[in-house]
Amino acid sequence: MNYVKEVLSSRELLVNLTLREIRGKYKRTIFGQLWSLANPLALMLIYTIVFAFILRVEPEPGDPSGLNVFAVWLLCGLLPWTFFANVITSGANSLIANAGLIQKVSFSRIVLPLSLVGSSIYNWLFEMAVLLLVLVIIGSFVWPWIPLLLVVMLLLAVFAAGIALMLAIANVYFRDTQWFLGIILQMWLYLTPIIYPASLVTAQSERIGYLFGTQLTVDFLYNLNPMAHFVEIFRNLLYDNRWPDPTEWLICALWAIGSLFVGVVVFRRNERNLAEAL
Amino acid sequence: MYHERNQTLKATIMRGRRSVHEDFWALDDVSFDVPTGSTFGLIGSNGSGKSTLLKCLANIYHPNSGSISHFGSMAAMLEVGSGFHSELSGRDNIYLNGSILGMSKKEVDRKYDEIVDFSGVEAFIDQPVKNYSSGMYVRLGFAVAINVDPDILVVDEVLAVGDADFQAKCMQKFADFKRDGKTVILVTHDMDTVSKMCDNVAWLSHGKLLEVGEAKPTIKAYLDSVTPGAAE
């Protein structure tokens, strides 16, 4: 509880550091904040061409919304993913990037990775607003789901923050962490049903049956991935326009709380030694 | 002190250990009291542990044994312009730096004019700080730091900045601090400043506290050791 008070007393600093990230990021560029849209849009274009036209992946139309636009279906999963990847990548680097500050000024170190979570959320809100606009244009009845959308965005942010905290500390002691992270995120993207529907995996899993005589199926292992559940909820709310399965909510909430808890404990234990370790 | 430090996984696994190190005591058995309202100087040769001691006071390093306690708010000026973002304007950086040093937005609002006036960069306050000359940059950083107004101020060799006019302003500000009964702990190599401003002085050498007490005798002892046999 003391720790929470300590962090709260640094909240103005958190706001200022977040603003520093946001304002500094696109300074002196022509398109400014629009660049935060550029990456997802480019990915959407490339993936749509490859997976919708060339490889002919066909996800089920929205149920019950009836929508059937691959590019939008893709974005509903891709935007949360890019947010998650950005948070943990920039968060992992946050302590090293601010080594000078840590060695010269005393303040609650946790505001450094959290300020990156904050600035990523700012960009994400901007991107989601554009996505909502597109969804409305193509006929998705998304208005009533917006409050739930904000809830699941919060859960994902909490989940990502916990992981970022752990990685930030790990990166101080083992500089490899940031490089491993790049590779892991690449693999993780393909292990999550973002560019292809989860039904393809389920179909394969049924064909293979149980693995090596155990009770495990491919599908079960596949669903151990927390991001699969987060993406499922996003797709349900935005594309299908329906209430997601309660078990999905439970799984996501548990992952979020667990990640934050472990992240804070790890961070707190190692916070004292940062100035010397950097 | 590391003889070998393995900061990547490959190095750690291949060498079978994270580091080969031996204990280096940057500070060994250092104990002293700083009376409230006094100006306390910390002198010693390079590498004697003065900056390490200040970082311990400023809560950046934590002592392996022993404790540090203080009464009242404390601010440390170990570096000017901490956290400045070069692309942001002087105005934005004042708020940013102020909040890094512990001032709330309201406090910065209140002192904003004083800070800008003290730094002398009013004409350029809305320009990005990367366009400032090095003197302007440092004057702005110092102006924010000195307006934090804590009960205890810990300063590390940052006095030798700016032109003569600015130096005079700084000296005046320190004198005001003293008059208001605030405590200042100062590290500097400029014996002139120490003898003029400090009431008590501690002399550190190789991590050990050689002498602590009134300013004049301690300074004399230090100077005698540095230039043996020189005239007083």
Image: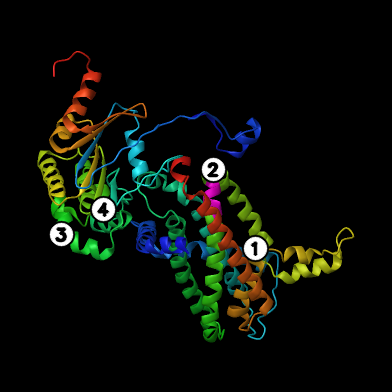
- Corner quadrant of residue B209: top left
Secondary structure beneath dot 4 equals loop
In this picture, residue A234 sits left or right of residue B183: right
The image position of residue B131, as x and y in percent, is 24, 48
Give the magenta part as a residue range: A166-171
State which chain disc 3 sits on. Answer: B
Secondary structure beneath dot 2 equals helix
How far is disc 4 from disc 3 in space, using C-alphas?
A: 18 Å
State which chain disc 2 sits on. Answer: A
Q: Earlier in the sequence, mark 4 or mark 3?
A: 3
Q: Give the labeled residue for mark 3.
A: B113
What residue lies at 24% left-to-right and 48% top-to-bottom? B141
In this picture, residue A137 sits left or right of residue A122: right
Tell me the mark number nearer the camera, choosing from 4 and 1. 4
Within 10 Å of disc 4 (Cα), the crowding (few <14, some 14-19, many 20+) is some
The image position of residue B182, as x and y in percent, is 19, 50
Please tell me the numbered disc located at residue B128. 4
Q: Give the labeled residue for mark 1.
A: A50
Tell me the mark number nearer the camera, choosing from 3 and 1. 3
The image position of residue A25, as x and y in percent, is 39, 57
Specify whether disc 1 shares its chain with disc 2.
yes
**Of B229 and A26, the residue lying toward us:** B229
**Of A77 and A164, the residue lying toward us:** A164
- Corner quadrant of residue B224: top left
- Given the image, on which type of amino acid does mark 4 rest? Pro
- Given the image, on which type of amino acid does mark 3 rest? Asp
Specify whether disc 3 shares its chain with disc 2.
no
Please tell me the numbered disc located at residue A173. 2
Within 10 Å of disc 3 (Cα), the crowding (few <14, some 14-19, many 20+) is few
- Given the image, on which type of amino acid does mark 2 rest? Tyr
How far is disc 4 from disc 1 in space, using C-alphas?
A: 44 Å
